[in-house]
Amino acid sequence: MTASDLSTSTTVEGTSERTAAHIETTERYAAHNYHPLPVVLAQGEGAWVVDVDGKRYLDCLAGYSALNFGHSNERLVAVAREQLGRLTLTSRAFFNDKLSGFAEALTRLTGKDMILPMNSGAEAVETAIKVSRKWGYEVKGVPAGQATIITMEGNFHGRTTTIVSFSDDDVATSGYAPFTTGFRSAKYGDIEAIAAAIDETTVGVLFEPIQGEGGVVMPPEGFLTQLRELCTERDVLMIADEIQSGLARSGKTFACDHEGVVPDIYIMGKALGGGIYPVSAIAADHEVMDVITPGSHGSTFGGNPLAAAIGTEVVAMLEEGTFQARSAEIGEQLVAGFGPLVGQGLSDVRVRGAWAGIDIDPSLMTGRQMSEALMARGILAKDTHGSTVRFAPPLVASDEDVAGLVAAVTDILAAARA
Ligand SMILES: *Cc1c(COP(=O)(O)O)cnc(C)c1O
């Protein structure tokens, strides 16, 4: 190992030999595109995971909200097992007997006419971009090759070359030029700035109703309603990336529901696959989706029967409403627990459903240090930027679990202030 290898490796000091061996092998053979906490997980159930040494942790990241329904969710695992033994892949060259039900269920959940299934979140975002541009040329009448899409400052939409083209995160973009053109950035939540950025070439406004990677950042109240009105008035598509904010995370099925707003395109991913399998999709009405014709877009695995079976069960679970209700309850507990810490080590707290972003006073500790201190107390979470930590426990977390999180953060801040 060279000195530079060592400097980018996760520290293994103070961990067991077994844990250290997994970390060293991973760091040696897998590219260093993440900086994980020094814990090696082997099992999970509900809101809890167990490491290779048998130590239990409350999972407050939940696979970046892919695990909204918890680890090893009984219903989802049963459906996946059953489908594994039956049929897993047909490609879209043929029909399969699971996509029909999945497509129907997801249109019911979104209220849209059609869906287009993909795999990863980034692929669904790419799909939304392609569909919006094609709609711009074929329906709106934008001159060929001129389409623009308005994006938000501080956004996170995934990692493909086109998607990082409109990221303002230097780490995400550095070294990857040249970038895709046709995107125009506006301040998040600033309806005037967005209105000013729209012109006759604009086909859509791509936004997160809550910026998850940005640190659970919410736009000002009324923004979603204003954006809906603006998009309708200017004939541009309102494209909501609900990959992280959707599917019960924010206390509602979609974060747009908090203002009763319906976008033109929903982008979904993460929890759509129940944390078992990558499943993503966009949903839109005929006017938009009908621009897609045979051969104009595709994916070998998109809409496969295993994905569709899991996704159908996810929708069935969401239609019962219990996860949304539980998310809202957890949110109340987080507000009550974290709210009083503002001025006591936190400079800001943002909560929507079972989703919290806390900004730590940077003179006390970094977000990474908070995550490490939490890990020592049996809680797993991850910093987003600098001194911001995001908490998104599985929605099956108990009141006791959430109380444990609040108590740990409170103690760690108190110790740092002492
Ligand atoms: C995670 C995420 C994506 C990308 O999803 P991947 O499955 O990692 O490609 C896109 N948008 C948002 C808002 C996300 O949180």
Image (tube, rainbow, N blue to C red):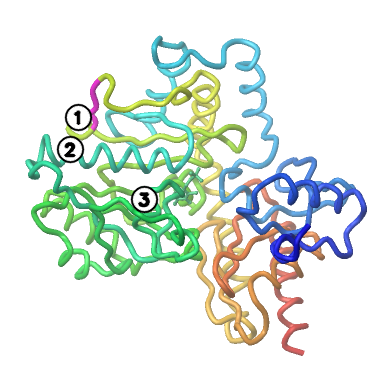
Could you tell whether 242 is left or right of 416 in the image?
Answer: left
Helix, strand or loop at mark 3: helix
Could you tell whether 88 is left or right of 111 in the image?
Answer: right
Report if residue 291 lies within the magenta region. Answer: yes
- Quick check: marks 2 and 1 in contact, CB under 8 Å? yes
Q: Which residue is mark 1?
A: 291
Helix, strand or loop at mark 1: loop
Amino acid type assigned to the residue bearing label 1 in the image = Val
Helix, strand or loop at mark 2: helix
Q: Which residue is mark 3?
A: 257
Neighbor class of circle 3 (other Cα within 10 Å; few <14, some 14-19, many 20+) is some
The x, y position of residue 16, in whole percent, is 91, 55
Amino acid type assigned to the residue bearing label 2 in the image = Trp
In the displayed structure, 26 sits above or below 184; it is above
Query: Which of the 4 image quarters holds residue 116?
Result: top left
Between discs 2 and 3, the one toward the N terminus: 2
Between discs 2 and 1, the one toward the N terminus: 2
Q: Which residue is mark 2?
A: 135
Report if residue 409 lies within the magenta region. Answer: no
